[in-house]
Image (cartoon, coloured by chain):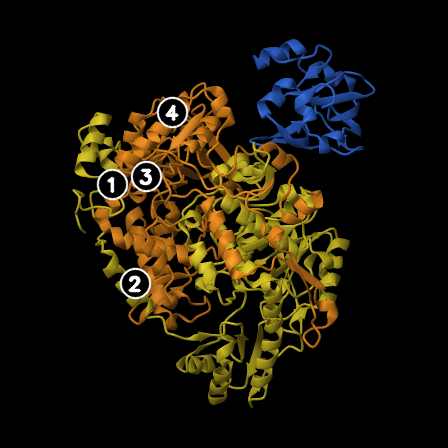
Amino acid sequence: MNFDQARFSRDDVYEPLLSEKDSTTVEVDSEGVLPDDLTRDELTLPGLSEPQLARHYTRLSQMNYSVELGPYPLGSCTMKYNPSFTEDVAADPNAAVHPDRSDRTIQGTLGLLHGLQEHLADIGGMDAVTLQPPAGAAGEFTGILVAKAYHESRNDDRSEIIIPSSAHGTNFASAAMAGYDVVELPSDDDGRVDMEALDAAISEETAALMLTNPNTLGLFERDIIEIAEMVHGAGGLLYYDGANLNALLGRARPGDMGFDIMHYNVHKTFATPHGGGGPGAGPVGVVEDLTEFLPSPMVRETASGYEQYEPESSIGKVHGFTGNWLVLVKAYAYIARLGDSGLADSSAKAVLNANYLASQVDLEVPYGPFHHEFAATAGDRDAADVAKRMLDYGVHPPTTKWPELVSQAMLTEPTEVEDKASLDDLAHAFNAAYADADEVLESAPSKTSARRIDQVSAARDPRLSWQALEQDE
Amino acid sequence: MFEIPDDRKYLESHEWTTTESDTARIGISDFAQDELGDVVFVELPEEGDELSAGDEFGVIESIKAVSDLYAPISGTVTAVNEDLFDAPELVNDDPYGDGWMFEIEPSDADEFDSLLSPEEYREQTE
Amino acid sequence: MTAGNGRRAGSPYAPHTDADEAAMLDAIGVESVESLFDIPEEVRFDGEFGIDGMDEKALRQSLSDLFARNEDLTEFLGRGHHAHYVPALVSDLSRRSEFLTSYTQYQPEVTQGFLQVLFEYQSMLVELTGLPVANCSMYDAATALAEAALLANRLRRGASGHRVLVPAHIQDGRLGVLENYLGGSDMEIGSYPMDDGAADVDALTDLVDDETVMVYAESPTVRGVIEERLADIGDLAHENDALFCLGSDLVALALLEEPASVGADVVVGEAGALGLGTAYGMGLGIFATREEYLRQVPGRLVGASEDAAEKRAFTLTLQTREQHIRKERATSNICTNQAWVALRTAMHMAWLGPDRLVDLATDAVTDARELAGRLDDLSGVKAPIYDRYHFREFVVRTDQPAPAITNDLAGRGFAVHALDDHHIQVCITDVNADAADELVAAFEEVV
C-alpha cells in the first residue's frame, strides 16, 4: 500500500496558526455594563470568517491519522472502529439536558444511565457500577478510594497497594494520589505475576493488589484464583484494571475471578472514539460488600421511575457532575447494538487477529500464549525508529518500548476490526520497516505531514503558545 | 567504554565528586548521561543550602526519563553551575567538565573514604 | 443480524469471512479460535448477559424513544455549568473522523493537525488568562481545582502549611472532588464566608495564615456574583506565601479583569461553556499557571519544535511530568483527558472571534441584570438578592415556597433551580434569552 499524508505548508511552517492568519484586538468598552476596574482593557484573538475557519480545520484534519484511515494497533489502547450511528445517538437534542434538572423531568437520561450500569455490571460480573469517573485513570483513583473507605469502615488501617512493574503508569499514580505507598511487584520469567514475590509482598498493610488480566503482555494470569485467595486471606482487596477487557468479553468476568473492584475503559472496550486523547469514561464496578461506598449519585429504578440516590457510605464525588455523558451514551449504544453474541465475537476476533498478525511478522514475540495483544521485540533495532518507519507504510505503529520487560518492545493490539487483508498490510509494514537499513530508519518518516520532530529542543526550550513563538521572533 | 576519571569518587547512583577538602565539585558520570539520553532540564540546589550525604539535591530530566540526584557528601553549597539552566546539554557533552552541577564546602572530609573508587565504580557499570 | 458476504452473525464491526478465518487459523497453526484462549476452566464464563443485539435502525428508534421521555423544558440553569449556542461549524467539523477517531499524539509526525488545534487552544487560554502556561485539558472545573490544590501542596514540599481555603458559596461537586483529591495527603479544606454574595475579605484576612497553601476564589461565583476584590484576595494569599487560584470560565474571562493582573497564580474553571452544550454536566477543565510552575503542571502540554525538514512542527512535550514515565511520582494520574472537547471549544472561540466573544460576555451581564429587574418587579419576588454585579445568573427570593414554584414552572415548560425553601437561581444565556419574556410571564402566574 502506498501512503502520502496531506501536507499543507507555507514557507517554514505547515498550515499557519490561526493567529498568523489574523490577529484582532478589541477594546473592551464596558460603559453602562460594569465599572472600568472590573473589566479587562482589551482582548486579542484571531477574527476569521466561517469559510476561512472551515478550511483551516479541514486542512488540519487531513494532517491527522485516525482509525478511519487505517490500522491503529497501539497496545493496551484498543483502537477499534467507532460506529458512526453512536454519534447521531449522542447528538439527539432530547439527550442534551442540564445536570441540575430534577429526576422526574429526565427519565430518559436516567434510564440510559441505569441501563448502562446494569449492562456493565453483567459484563464484569460485578454487583454495582458507578459511571461517574471521566477516564480510566479517574476510575482507578475512584476504585482505590472505595477500597480505602472499605478498610476504614472496618477500622483497618492499611498503607500499601501492590502493583506489578509491568502495569500501566496510571496505576502507580492513582494509588499514590489516594495516599498509598506503592509496592512494585516483579514479573516471573514467564511474564506473569511472580507468586513468590507476591507472597513476600502481601502483608497486613496490603490494601489492594491492582492487576490487569490479560496483563500488558497479553498473557492471562493463570494463577488468578490463587492470587485472589492470597490477597483476600491477608484482608486485602483485588482490583482489576479494565484496559484489556476486550480480550475477555463474554468469555471470562473479573467478578468470577475474585476481583472486588474494577474499572472499565469504555473508550477502549466499548468503542467510543478516543477523540485525540479523550474524552473517555472509566466506570467502576464493585462487589456487593463495597456498593455502599460508591460515588454519589447512583441511579436506581423504583415503582415510580428512575431516581438518583446517594449510597449509604458514599465516598462522594470524583467529577463535578455525573461524568462524561456523551461518552456513556455511545458506550451504551455500542453494547446494545452488539448484544451477547456481538460482544463475544469481539473478543474472539480480537484474539484471532493478534495471533494471526504475530504469525506474520518477522519480529520475535518472547512471551505467550497471548490474547488480544502481543509484545514483539525489535531486537537490536531501535523500536522507536522502526515505529517511525512504519508510518511511511501507511499504518500507525504499535506502542513502543513498553512494557519494559521486553527489550525494544512493540506492543501490538490490532483489535477485531481489521480484516485479513488489512492485517497483511500491517505485517508488511512491520517486516519492511524492520528490514530497512539503519539510515532509512533514522531519517523516517518521510511520507507523513511532518518529518521527524525534534523532541529534545521542544523540551529544552518549551514554547507552549503562539504568544511564546511571537516573543521568540 | 565510558570515561571514568581517576581523580574523583563516585556514588552507586552515578554522581561524582572531586575530593578537595575545601571545595569539592559534583556532577554525574558519563555512564549516567548516556543512560539518560539528551538532557533537557536540570534542577539544582541553591547557594547556601546545607546538604547531608545521601540527600536529594536536584532532579535531571531527559525526554524519556527523570532521575533524582543525590549528594555524595555533606556540606554547604558554595556555587551552582547556572550555565546548565540554559544549556542542559552540557551534561551530555562534557559530564566531567562544563557539565558540573554544583560546588560544596565539605563538612566532613572523612566522607570521601566511604565513596566508590573509580575502579569500584567501573565494576558497577560493567 | 445480517450475514451477507459470507459473514456470520456476531459483531457487525468484525469483518472476517469464513474463508479468511480459516486461512488465519491455518497460518497460526490452531484448529479453532477457542483454542487461542488460555483461560483456566474454573474462571470461564459460560452464561449470558441477556443483552439482545439490535440492528442499527431499531436501536436508534429505541434510544430516540427513550430520550423523548425527557421533558422538553427551556432551561434557565447554570450553577457552574453553562451552555451557549454551539454553531454548526463546531458540530460538523469536530465530527470529522480524522479528529474524532484518532488517539493521543504519541506519533506527532502523523498527528500534526490535532496537535496544532490543541496548541491553538492553549494559546487562546494564555490570552484570556494572561498566564503563559495552559495545559490542553483537565476533565472539568472540579478536577482542575483539585489539581491546583495538589500543585500548591507540592510546591510547599514538606514545609509548614496544609490548608486550602475555598469560598462558602461553591458548587457541591467542586467541593466534593476537592475533598477526595486531598484525601490522600495531609491537606485540609477551610471555608471562608461570603458577604452579600461575594468573598468576605475581612473574614478571609483573619483566616489566611502561614498554614494556608492556597486561596481559591471564583468570579463569577456559583451564584453568578462578579467578585470585585480579586486583587485584594490575591495579595492576602501572597502575603502568606500561599497560591492564589482563580476559578472562572472562558466567556467571563473575555470581559472580566485579566487573572494575571489580579495576581492569579493558577486559573481553573469550565471551558465547556463554549463548544459543548449542556451534555448533562460533562465538562472541560481549564488549567493555566505561571512559567515557574511549568514542571509541576498536571496533564498534557503541546509545544512547538522543528522537524527534519526544518519546518515548525508540534509535539506533546515535557512528558516526564506524566504518569507513563514518572509513575507514582507523576504530577497527576491523568492520561486520557478531554482533548476532543478542547478542539470543539477552540473551534467555537475561533468562530466567535474577539468581537462576538466580548459581546457574548457583555450580554451575560446586561441580560442577567434586565431579567432580574423584571422578576423583581413582580410582587412576592426579590431579584437579585445580592447587591452586586452578576454574570449570567442570579438568586431570586420568593415569598412563596421555592420548590412549589419550580414545580409549577416545570409544568409551564421551564426549568429553574431551587436553592432552598425560598431561593431560586436563574441563569440566562444566548440559548434561552428568547424565552425570557415567557419565563417572566410564567413566574408572574406562579408566584
Residue pointed to by mark 4: A432
Residue at mark 3 shares a chain with residue at mark 4: yes
Q: Label 1 belongs to which residue?
A: A251
Q: Who's the residue at 64% across and 72% down the image?
A: C197
In the rendered structure, the colour chosen for chain A is orange
Question: Depth-wise, is mark 2 or mark 4 nearer the camera?
Answer: 4
Q: Mark 3 is on which residue type?
A: Thr
Q: Position of residue B32 (x, y in %)?
A: 62, 21
Question: In the rendering, at what x and y percent does residue B106 appear?
Answer: 79, 22
Q: Secondary structure at mark 1?
A: loop
Q: Nearer the viewer, residue C23 or A274?
A: C23
Mark 4, other Cα within 10 Å: few <14 / some 14–19 / many ≥20: some
Front of the two marks 1 and 3: 3
Name the residue that disc number 3 marks: A415
Q: How far apart in space, not on screen, are marks 1 and 4 (Cα)?
A: 36 Å
Q: Colour of chain C?
A: yellow
Q: Quick check: C310 left or right of A471?
A: left
- Pick the front one: C342 or C89: C89
Q: Position of residue B80 (x, y in %)?
A: 77, 29
User: Which of marks 4 and 1 precedes in the sequence?
Assistant: 1
Chain painted blue: B
Looking at the image, is mark 3 or mark 4 earlier in the sequence?
Answer: 3
Residue C396 appears at what percent x and percent y?
A: 56, 79
Q: Are marks 3 and 4 in contact (CB under 8 Å)?
A: no
Q: Looking at the image, can residue C2 be seen? A: yes
What residue lies at 50% left-to-right and 58% top-to-bottom? Answer: C283
When asked about the image quadrant of residue A237, the answer is top left
- Residue assigned mark 2: C63
Q: Amino acid at mark 4?
A: Ala
* Disc 2 from disc 4: Cα separation: 47 Å
